[in-house]
Image (tube, rainbow, N blue to C red):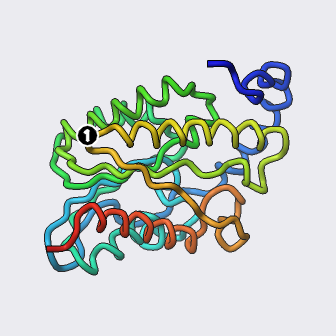
Amino acid sequence: MRPAADQILRIPLAPLLAAQGLGVRRRANTLPEPPGARQGQAGKGAPLRLLIVGDSSAAGVGARSQDTALSGQVVKNLAQDFDVSWKLIGESSITTTGMLKRLATVPPSAFDVAITALGVNDVTRASSRAKWVKRQTELAEVLSSKFAVQTIVASGLPPMGAYPELPQPLRWVLGAHAKRLDDALADLAATHRQLTHLPLNLPFEPRYQASDGYHPSEEAYTIWAAMFADHIRAQLPLS
């Protein structure tokens, strides 16, 4: 396959992209992972064992607490219909490769559904499409074999080309690569028995961005969590 323009221009733009990336990384790493429970049980109804896996967005960076972050909002939403037993494994700056290493240290346990939020750090580290698909396939295998997951909902990558805090040409390069990896994830999900792809369509207004201009705000987490919950309900209709 012929390289895209952004891939070709990475080489001559490398010094500028490296300098811009360093500045963005400094700003993006100023917010901590919020305090709060990373596992628990809530709700009434049919039992649902939920595993949440991902990077800083899964870990709730940009929220004041886990209750108002992605995990807390997903559980609160699903608890309207299910008795949810849940666990969060999230870590800032982690890639899919890093998450595979992290999961290798976690004791085996059983979950019905897993949601994943990974990819931004794979984009910023210029992970190739082939490596990304390989690692996501391995992740699905680990979730299904070690954690008995039957349904895996993988969040799509955000449209990084729309991030207002990213300078050009870094925004263009990262945006193009994020789109490339997201398309690959959607293609993988289309042929995988347990994996589904959830397109990430969050509005880019100031109120939907954390103070660093990079992570989601609590309002954005609320919308994203509702998207996950609705998707899970569609996969597991109430009896």
Mark 1, secondary structure of its residue: loop
Q: Which residue is mark 1?
A: 106
Quadrant position of the N terminus in the picture: top right
Residue 122 is left or right of residue 206, and the answer is left
Task: Look at 76% across and 21% down and name the residue there.
Answer: 8
Q: Residues within 10 Å of mark 1 (few under 14, many from 20)?
A: few
Could one spot residue 22 in this view of the protein?
no
Instruction: Work out whether 195 lies above or below 235.
Output: above
Residue 127 is left or right of residue 185, and the answer is right
Amino acid type indicated by mark 1: Val
- Residue 5 percent coordinates (x, y): 77, 27
- Residue 174 percent coordinates (x, y): 70, 39
Residue 67 is left or right of residue 167, and the answer is left
- Residue 196 percent coordinates (x, y): 36, 49
Q: Give the number of marks.
A: 1
Task: Look at 17% across and 44% down and name the residue there.
Answer: 148
- Residue 33 percent coordinates (x, y): 51, 57
